[in-house]
Image (cartoon, rainbow, N blue to C red):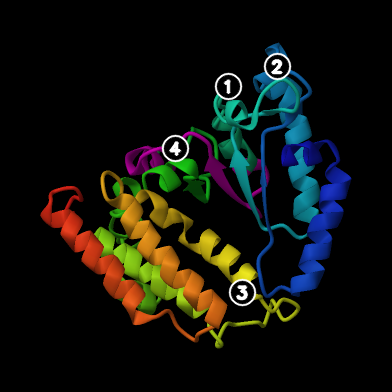
Amino acid sequence: FGASLMTQPELVGDIVRACVEAVRDEIPITVKCRLGTEQKMGLKADFDFERDYPKLLHFCQIVRDAGCTHIILHTRKAVLGGLSTDENRRVPMLCREAAWRLATDLPDVAITANGQFKTLSECAAALANTPEGCRPIAGVMVGRAACAHPWELLSAADESCILSDLAPPPPPAIQALRVRTRRDAIAACLSHCARELSSEYDTRHRSFFIPTPSEQRRLCTILLKPTGSLIYGRGSKKVKSGMWDGIDAWCRETKESLDPKVLAQSEEVVRLLRNRGEVPRE
């Protein structure tokens, strides 16, 4: 498990320091960590403030001193032996209070809470209810729930969070991107993928990496993963198959943009599915 690095805080500090030096302040360096680690499941697998918080604070102070400006805290401990990766996301008890405690003790570091947030209302409640005597956290991270249910969770996120009166105005390009339907989301993701991997791809920070066709395919898989749960039910495989057939052809031919037929085919399939009542219109 990557969380095992928490047992070597000085090493993590060296890694953060090397990252900071490599990007030369052009990219903020963040750290995502657990509340701590245990070798096996037992009573100590649950977070105890008196026993565990000093070690967590020490770890976070080391990465802060190395140049980390933002810590995303998965608010449960990691059990390195005896639990699977999936079980480690569910079995150890949550202790979200630790996020606010860190935000108070490390005011120069942005602290974001992560772990078991499944709805926008849960996120809003966490941001609005700061425990007495604590500083507010910087934000809330939604992980696997957003991948599993992207439309249900994220379709209203921009309106309720990013574009709300409480948040600073986003860049004009973001304001103009209003995804109203699942088809819009798929088309936007495909266009984004084409831009990222086109001949105009920004290599300022990736000059050492010129993607081959197979590497382009792998990057497309990463960029388009969120679309996998947008369309489901009978006929969904046809949508994904149409997208990937076109992407594979583009990667082989290294075109500057995705073939317009890919977008047209995907949109047509989605339209047909909607007409059969298999895809919600909202």
What range is drawn magenta here? 103-128
Side of 83 relative to 161 (left or right): right
Residue drawn 37% across the image and 78% down it: 173
Which residue in the protein does label 1 denote?
91
Q: Quadrant of residue 38?
A: top right
Res 225 label: none
Side of 244 relative to 39 (left or right): left
Q: CA distance from mark 4 to mark 2?
A: 23 Å
| Image location (x, y in percent) of residue 148 | 41, 43
> Is 114 in the magenta?
yes
Q: CA distance from mark 2 to mark 3?
A: 44 Å
**Disc 1 element:** loop
**Disc 2 element:** loop
> Which is in the foreground here, disc 4 or disc 1?
1
Q: Are marks 4 and 2 in contact (CB under 8 Å)?
A: no
Residue 267: tell me if it is visible.
yes
Which residue in the protein does label 2 denote?
41
Amino acid tagged 4: Phe
- Whichever of callouts 4 and 2 sits on the residue coming sooner in the sequence is 2
Q: CA distance from mark 1 to mark 2?
A: 9 Å
> Is 112 in the magenta?
yes
Amino acid tagged 2: Met
| Image location (x, y in percent) of residue 227 | 39, 56
- Whichever of callouts 3 and 1 sits on the residue coming sooner in the sequence is 1
Which residue in the protein does label 3 denote?
213
> Which is in the foreground here, disc 3 or disc 1?
3
In the rendered picture of this protein, how many numbered marks are placed on residues? 4
Residue drawn 73% across the image and 35% down it: 56
Amino acid tagged 3: Pro
